[in-house]
Image: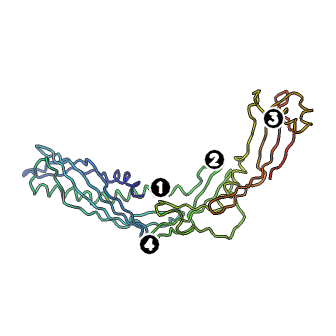
Amino acid sequence: VSEIGKAPLQQALNVTVPYFLDWNGEVHQPTRIQTLSVHVSHFHLKFVADFGVRLLVAANFTFKVFRVPEPLELRLPVVVLADARVAQGSVGTPVVSISACFPLFSDTKVPDGSAGLARGPLALVQKHVRAILRNKLCLSISNLVQGLNVHLGTLIGLNPVGPESQIRYTMVNVPKVTKDYISLDINAVLFLLGKPIVLPVDATPFVLPLHVGTNRAMAAVGLSQDLFDSVLLLMQKAGALNLDITGQLESDDNLLNTSVLGRLIPEVARSFPKPMPVALKVQLGATPVVTLHTHNATLQLQPFVEVLAVASNSAFHSLFSFDMV
């Protein structure tokens, strides 16, 4: 997670430093300071039990000071410590907030080859840059966290999963934070045509097993059987599991025809002396049932199959139907 977060963090820390007012003995001369680069060399996250996350960010800033007669390049190592509380919002979403933030500065470095600068003016420039970063770095991290909250806020409301179906997430309880992980108990409700998919009440609680996955796993996701049942019920009601098997109706190589079927059912051969294409309409009349086992799952389907033949006028003629168990 830390490696993934480096890129947006570097972008957020690339703050603008305003002009430095340099006193030349008579007037204040504005000196432009440009942030050339920000490199996050270390980004560490640590879980704090019953609180949230502690962040440690080590970054190297490179600035260009446009002084006369030649510009000067400065490098400033910075370490930022921040505490982020993880809680539950009033509308049922996880909310992350920065509760404390402290930037720690090392000595400014002047790379070899840069123009010389007296110790006094250098100290003033360094003081100016530090004052700006002290105010802006923590604000930038806080804004980055607020952007995360915007994404977490999309859990609320109906989110489309198909042309006529939606899903809504809500967080059931306050996030559980230990020294090893953060656990979010999320409830998902599926909707079809604006109406929720309601399952029979099941008193069996769902708990994610401890030590699930591997030690190198970044995240563990547990899906309850109720969620599988809701998804299958939604797909069954929406007709997403229905099939129309037609083959190549106009092809001479199509084996799905009345001639082949007539070898098994004489009535079909008598009704269609000339080979005509056959189509199969498969519909799920009963709700699919999924049973979860260790390392695998069993899906039970009960399709209703209707066999149709294409008549001479291109209309479909129902031959027979049957249930499959």
Residue sitting nearer the eye, 207 or 142: 207
Q: Amino acid at mark 1?
A: Val
Residue sitting at x 89%, y 35%: 268
At label 2, which amino acid type do we have?
Gly
Q: Which residue is mark 4?
A: 49
Q: Earlier in the sequence, mark 4 or mark 2?
A: 4
**Furthest-front residue in view?**
263
Q: Is residue 197 left or right of residue 269?
A: left
Q: Which residue in the protein does label 2 denote?
A: 162
Asked if the residue at tag 3 contacts the one at tag 2, i.e. Cβ–Cβ closer than 8 Å, the answer is: no
Work out whether mark 2 precedes mark 3 in sequence or the reverse, and give the earlier one: 2
Dot 4 amino acid type: Ala
In front of the other: 103 or 320: 320
Q: Position of residue 209 (x, y in %)?
A: 57, 68
Q: Of the two numbered discs 4 and 3 on the same chain, state the one appearing first in sequence.
A: 4
Pick whichever, 25 or 202, lies toward us: 202
Q: Residue at x 13, y 43 (%)?
A: 70
Check if mark 3's residue and mark 1's residue have beta carbons within 8 Å.
no
Query: Residue 278 shows which numbered tag?
Result: 3
Q: Nearer the viewer, mark 3 or mark 1?
A: 3
**Marks 4 and 2, how far apart in space?**
39 Å
Could you say whether the residue bearing mark 3 is in a helix, strand or loop? strand
* Residue 279 horizontal side relative to residue 192, left or right: right
Give the CA separation, mark 3 to mark 1. 53 Å
Q: Secondary structure at mark 1?
A: helix
Amino acid type at circle 3 is: Val
Residue placed under numbered mark 1 in the picture: 150
